[in-house]
Amino acid sequence: MPRPGDQVAGVRPGSRARRVCVIGAGAAGLACAERLRALSASVSITVIDADADQPYNRPPLSKDVLSGRVDAAEARLRSDEQLAELRIDLRAGSPVERLDTRTRTVVVTKGQPVPYDDLVLAPGCAPVTPWHESAPWIRTLHSLADVRVLRDDLVLPSRVVIVGGGLIGLEAAAVLRGLGHRVVVVEAGEGPLQRIVGPQVAAWLEGRHREEGVEFELGRRVVAISGSADAGVVTLDDGRGVDGDVVVCAVGVRPATQWLVGSGVELGSSGEILADERLRTTAPGVWAAGDAVSWPSASAARRLRVEHWTCAREQGRHVAEQLLAADAARTAAFDTVPYFWSSQYGALLQGAGSFHGDEVIVDGPSTSPAGLVARYLTDGTLTGVLTVGSPRTFQELRSRLPGGPLATP
């Protein structure tokens, strides 16, 4: 496998600009492109994305954009003018068909193949929609286009069924309740977000949402979704049906990497891109960053795949720096302490580290009776922290985590 700084086969120094192609214009891809330009005025940068609206910020979609507090223009990460000033050739609305690592070209469905000397894979993920074929009107919350369609569907007072009690499902529930809609969350686990944060915090989150009028169907799996053009019926595994004017599927995402099969880029069992500690893939000259990449984390002592904005940005910048490193002495392994944040009912939820410790201590901060502080410990050592409505406490606890301080949103 080539190392950062290795001369690309067939390219003589000074013969032409080094061509870097980035697949994906989300947080990781754009961070990589911007860092590349900051480090080099001469490198040629092409960014390709299937989404015609890119580049935009995904975290606000299920919060501020859905609520109408932020419009599509405000969600953009960079304007067309800014991209032009950075000399980043953005090709949005251009799906990638396949990757030819032998000729170092990216084959797109529209236009000519794009040649590269170095390639950065930041394709992100796509929403899982297991019932979509039988009910194509099921809505998701993964793109700006998704939000536009969902907002058009919502006529007060709509009854909205959200399948999935993870972060996106809970954020959508909070926003839609705030807009005056009836909301039912169907979750296979015994509590919302329980698989991630554990039963104690899940119970607190459930209680907070119930206070706002959200209904829950917990410990129930969806076996079918049916209905007419105007409404749907979500059938649960106990035979009951939950009616909804709108059904939102928020059961998770999977790496958008099907087009990489057979390319020479090794994928894991879930379609994730398998990278090494420096985020290099198994194909020469190909790197990876963002939600779709798995890498060996030294601090976690295992492979990680993190689906959070901060990690995606960090990885994009890291790849740019490693890709342009002049010598092996400047190369470095990537590592981070996973961090995420959410906003629900006006309160900031923040989490960092690992939530799989053998002990969880949960209490409410004295400054906010409606808040929460959860400390996750392994063998008596703090390994994770989650707070709601207590950013100062979060920052103090976060600084004690192994791996050092993190960037904030």
Image (spheres, helix red, strand yellow):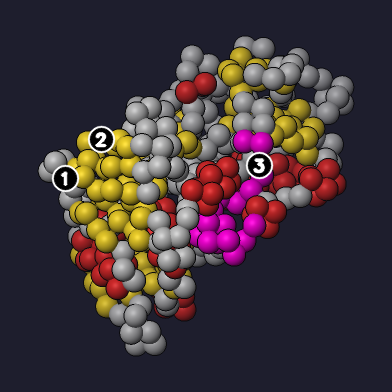
Label 2: how many Cα within 10 Å (few below 14, some 14–19, many 20+): some
Q: Which residue is mark 2?
A: 224
Mark 1, secondary structure of its residue:
loop
Q: What residue is rendered at 34% in x and 28% in y?
A: 134
Q: Is residue 227 above or below residue 340?
A: above
On the picture, is 61 further left or further right than 330? left
Question: Along the horizontal axis of the image, is 203 left or right of 10?
Answer: left
Q: Read off the magenta span.
A: 51-71
Which of labels 1 and 3 is toward the front?
Answer: 1
Q: Which mark is residue 240?
A: 1
The x, y position of residue 313, in whole percent, is: 58, 50
Q: Secondary structure at mark 2?
A: strand
x and y percent of residue 408 in the render?
55, 64
Q: Secondary structure at mark 3?
A: loop
Q: State the quadrant of the N terminus.
A: top right
Against 129, residue 309 (above or below) is below
Q: Position of residue 144 (x, y in %)?
A: 58, 46
Q: State the CA–CA distance, disc 1 to disc 3.
A: 40 Å
Q: The disc labelled 1 sits on which kind of residue? A: Arg
Residue 24 in the image: state x and y as whole percent. Answer: 61, 36
Looking at the image, which residue is at 17% across and 50% down? 219
Circle 3 residue: 54
Q: Alpha-carbon distance for marks 2 and 1? A: 11 Å
Q: Quadrant of residue 400?
A: bottom left
Tally the numbered discs. Answer: 3
Which one is in front, 205 or 14?
A: 205
Q: Which residue corresponds to the image point at 34% horizontal and 58% vertical from the top-left?
A: 183
Q: CA distance from mark 2 to mark 3?
A: 33 Å
Outermost top residue: 102
